[in-house]
Image: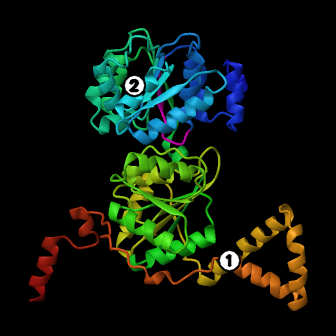
Amino acid sequence: MSTFYEFEIHHNIHRALTHMGFEEATPIQEQTIPIALTGRDIIGQAQTGTGKTVAFGVPLVNMVDVEAEKIQGIVIAPTRELVIQVAEEINKIGRFQNVHALAIYGGQEMNKQIRSLKKKPQIIVATPGRLMDHMRRKTIRLKTIEMVVLDEADEMLNMGFIEDITMILSEMPEEKQTLLFSATMSKAVLQIAKTYMKDPETVAIKAKEVTVKNVSQLCYKVRESEKFPTLCRLLDVNNPELAIVFGRTKRRVDELSEALNKFGYKAEGIHGDISQDKRSSIMKRFKEGRINLLVATDVAARGLDISGVSHVYNFDLPQDPESYVHRIGRTGRAGKTGMALTFVTPSEIDHIKTIEKVTKRTMEWVSVPSKEEAIENQQRKAADLLMEIAGKANLYSYHGIAKHLMQEEDPVTLVSAALKILTKEPKDQGQVKLTDEAPLRVKKSRAEKHKGEKPYRERRRRVKVKN
């Protein structure tokens, strides 16, 4: 695997990548960056979590003429969340090169964006709809664009942005470099490539290697009423640094995040009805670790690119196997291992079999940890915290009262009391009542329904003989 020092990029970009903690390039970066630096168009088939933002962000920043006060590069992405994250990543890459990227998306005040555009950012990261708004107002002109990136092209076309994309691309100079990234290569995506790209080089990263290689997939067979106590027990055993809990509906997300907070967990919920300002605030606190549980619907989590997610909990099964793959792709990133834990009601077993066919991987069925295991794990966590404080903190001012307490009680009793204070012992989560969600059922074909049965004519004939 290549290091970034093997690429012919500006030393300020090397410096920024080092500050970001990057050493070795991921497969998509290793294959994309050298080709992009030559100026060729590229079709990259890769999913979120492969490191594709850096794969196009590095050549994008490297291309910019820092002396020219004009928009030179543009990234078009399907969602506000992805636009914000891509802009943040590009700004990190360009921090020492004096290259600035501006996020442009709907839901943000137009006048604020216009004021930001007057500061002459070299790179724009935008959703198609809001970019079109600026084009109509002539607050963004595309005649100076030298490189355009279409990120998650299949998702943009699925969301109905095909007319916007074709209009935007037609307004750009013919002599430009185009990088297109897509998880799948549909006819619509290939048509965009054929119309607007010149002899593109294709770089493909196999989806199954990306989505499940570093992720342990565990299944728990539970009744609907057992889901919440099971989730709490697993959280107590796993102690995730950052985790995403997926619910199927907005109501589920609201009820679940409220219940988790009631029992002392630091959780926030996001779904389609949450305002953009609140979503941004929640995501900031999640990335900073001020909350460690994000409860989300599939729609709200689309495009999220968060490093450090150690666990994904599928509280409800998703509607389709593709959404399952997308969910578990939130963890096990950048070479790290992750864990996906899925709750399955008895009537949803067939749905798991369908998912296994898509992921080409058999899931591991495991038992729910006991209450005793959860308590023991919390006690160990409290002991580790106590040792950490003892090793790092300046405790001199506490010595007097500590000596006094030791005259009243023996040291073992005092340490036990300290551990009890620090231990979050499980409460009775069974008293929480969440609104039931209907289980998913896989529709069986006529042949599957009668699998193992005798043909109808033979069954009827046997009845006649019997009579």
Which residue occupies the foreground of this view, 19 or 451?
Answer: 19
The quadrant where residue 434 appears: bottom left
Q: Which mark is residue 412?
A: none
The tag on residue 423 is: 1
> Quick check: 17 left or right of 73?
right
Q: Residues within 10 Å of mark 1 (few under 14, many from 20)?
A: some
The magenta-colored residue range is: 41-50
Horizontal side of 294 relative to 185 (left or right) equals: right
Verify whether residue 45 appears in magenta: yes
Please tell me whether residue 186 is drawn above or below residue 265 in the rendered image. Answer: above
| Mark 2 crowd level (few <14, some 14–19, many ≥20, 10 Å Cα) | some
> Is-magenta flag for residue 28?
no
Name the element at disc 1: loop
The numbered mark, 2 or 1, whose residue comes first in the sequence reads 2
Quarter of the image holding residue 97?
top right
Which of the image's four quarters has the N terminus? Answer: top right
The image shows residue 115, relative to residue 404, as above or below, that is: above
Question: Does residue 422 sit above or below 149 in this rendering?
Answer: below
The answer to whether residue 46 is seen in the rendering is yes
- Give residue 166's position: percent from left, percent from top: 30, 22
Q: Residue 452, located in which quarter of the rendered image?
A: bottom left
Amino acid of disc 2: Ile
